[in-house]
């Protein structure tokens, strides 16, 4: 079973890290007029970031990997950290 609190925490971390790596070009893509407010079947509003905003980001070698939670498509990145010795 998926622990929603953990998923939401990782999602917040992912969004925070993503914005740190975004440049001016990518930020302009996020502000695109194509970003219309959409709704899930239960009425949750969302805006989908264009795929182009994640292309060729420096130090972000992850391929798109999505999971759907409560009708929202969320991208995930599997990051492994080295074990402490």
Image (cartoon, rainbow, N blue to C red):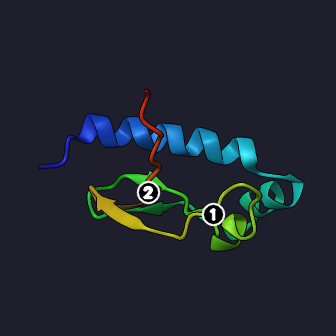
- The answer to whether residue 72 is left or right of residue 70 is right
Residue labelled with disc 2: 76
Which residue is more in the foreground, 45 or 19? 19
Label 2 element class: loop
Instruction: Give the residue displayed 65% in from the left and 65% down from the top.
Output: 35
Please say if 64 is above or below 8: below
Query: Residue at the right extreme?
Result: 24
Q: Position of residue 18 (x, y in %)?
A: 64, 48
Who's the residue at 37% across and 52% down the image? 44
Q: Dot 1 corresponds to which residue?
A: 61
Q: State the residue at coordinates (48%, 55%).
A: 46
The numbered disc on residue 2 is none
Label 1: which secondary element: loop
Q: Residue 37, image x and y in percent?
A: 55, 60
Residue 63 image offset from top left, x and y in percent: 54, 70
Q: Would you say 60 lies left or right of 8 here?
A: right
In the rendered image of this protein, does residue 7 appear above or below residue 29? above
Q: Quadrant of the C terminus?
A: top left
**Residue depicted at 86% across the width and 61% down the height:** 25
Of 84 and 71, nearer the camera is: 84
Is the residue marked by circle 1 packed among few (<14), some (14-19), or many (20+) residues within 10 Å? few
76 sits left or right of 31 in the view: left
Residue 72: name its quadrant. bottom left
Q: Position of residue 30 (x, y in %)?
A: 72, 58
- Crowd around label 2: few <14 · some 14–19 · many ≥20 (10 Å): some
């Amino acid at each position: 079973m998926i622990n929603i609190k953990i998923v939401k925490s990782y999602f917040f971390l992912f969004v925070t890290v993503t914005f740190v790596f975004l440049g001016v070009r990518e930020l302009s893509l996020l502000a695109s007029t194509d970003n219309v407010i959409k709704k899930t079947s239960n009425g949750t509003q969302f805006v989908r970031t264009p795929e182009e905003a994640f292309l060729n980001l420096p130090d972000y070698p992850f391929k798109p990997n999505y999971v759907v939670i409560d009708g929202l498509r969320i991208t995930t990145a599997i990051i492994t950290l080295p074990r402490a010795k």
